[in-house]
Amino acid sequence: MVNVLKRMRGLQPLFAIRHGEGAAILPPPPLPQLTRLDLHYDRKQWNKSTRPARTLHKEHLPRLKYHNPGLPIRVEQGPGRLHLTFESADQNALSELETTSLETSNEGEFRATWSEVETKSKTASEATASSPSSADSTFTRSVELRLGPHQPRSIWSWFQAATKCDPVPPNPEETAQMEKLDEFFVQAEIDRQRVKAGMDAIRKQKEELQKARDAAARMANEE
């Protein structure tokens, strides 16, 4: 039973990172490609103001990284903000990002600051390897979102709209396994409480028996 319990518990982290908010796949070209994600917030503070960024860091980003292992993600100490960098060979597609990523929350509109579309400068190795026939330009653009009072789910909704990422489709087999796992741990808790109740009853009986023995010993000494 113990080995089964350990194996079942070992599945929990896998299911937790493969499913849930943040489990999404970034779109392929020709849509703009998210090439970098930078998150800054006060990691030393545990309060309401840092909760949105902390939830994004601890819950959403691990799932996003799992399904998009090539995406560079950096989390640093600093004022709360989310910075995304996009690249595309289609300059117009980058220009349209600003109009398609507008989202609102209960606290009002998001205040996202978009940079101008720029031509990406090539590195020395890229410039050397390029030929006249491969002179197509690559463009880049970034956006910075101030992480104010917005709720974590609202921030993730904004991220989905900005990147056009798609939620990972449900896997019927894994969904069934997750349901069985939940049932297993519910039953395990019931069994644990039942065993605890039995142990408590045995301990109480021993205590009462010891009290009876002590009382009998006192009565014998008084005679």
Image (tube, helix red, strand yellow):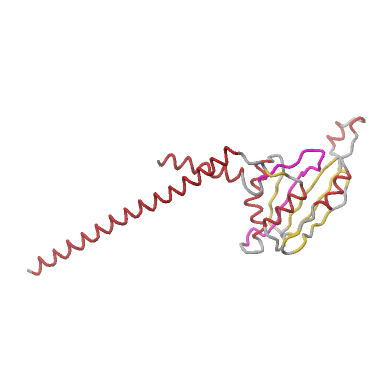
Indicate the quadrant containing the N terminus: top left, top right, bottom left or bottom right: top left
x then y, percent, for residue 92: 89, 45
Of residues 124 and 189, which is closer to you in this image? 189
Q: Is residue 57 left or right of residue 219?
A: right
Which residue is located at x 67 percent, y 42 percent? 168
Of residues 179 and 40, which is closer to you in this image? 179
122 is higher (above) or lower (below) than 41: above
x then y, percent, for residue 134: 89, 32
Which residue is located at x 53 percent, y 40 percent? 177
Of residues 11 and 62, which is closer to you in this image? 11
x then y, percent, for residue 41: 69, 58
x then y, percent, for residue 78: 71, 58
33 in the magenta segment: yes
| Magenta part of the chain | 23-45
Q: Is residue 211 left or right of residue 125?
A: left
Q: Is residue 170 left or right of residue 33?
A: left
223 in the magenta segment: no
77 is higher (above) or lower (below) than 181: below
The answer to which quarter of the image holds residue 176 is top right
Indicate the quadrant containing the C terminus: top left, top right, bottom left or bottom right: bottom left
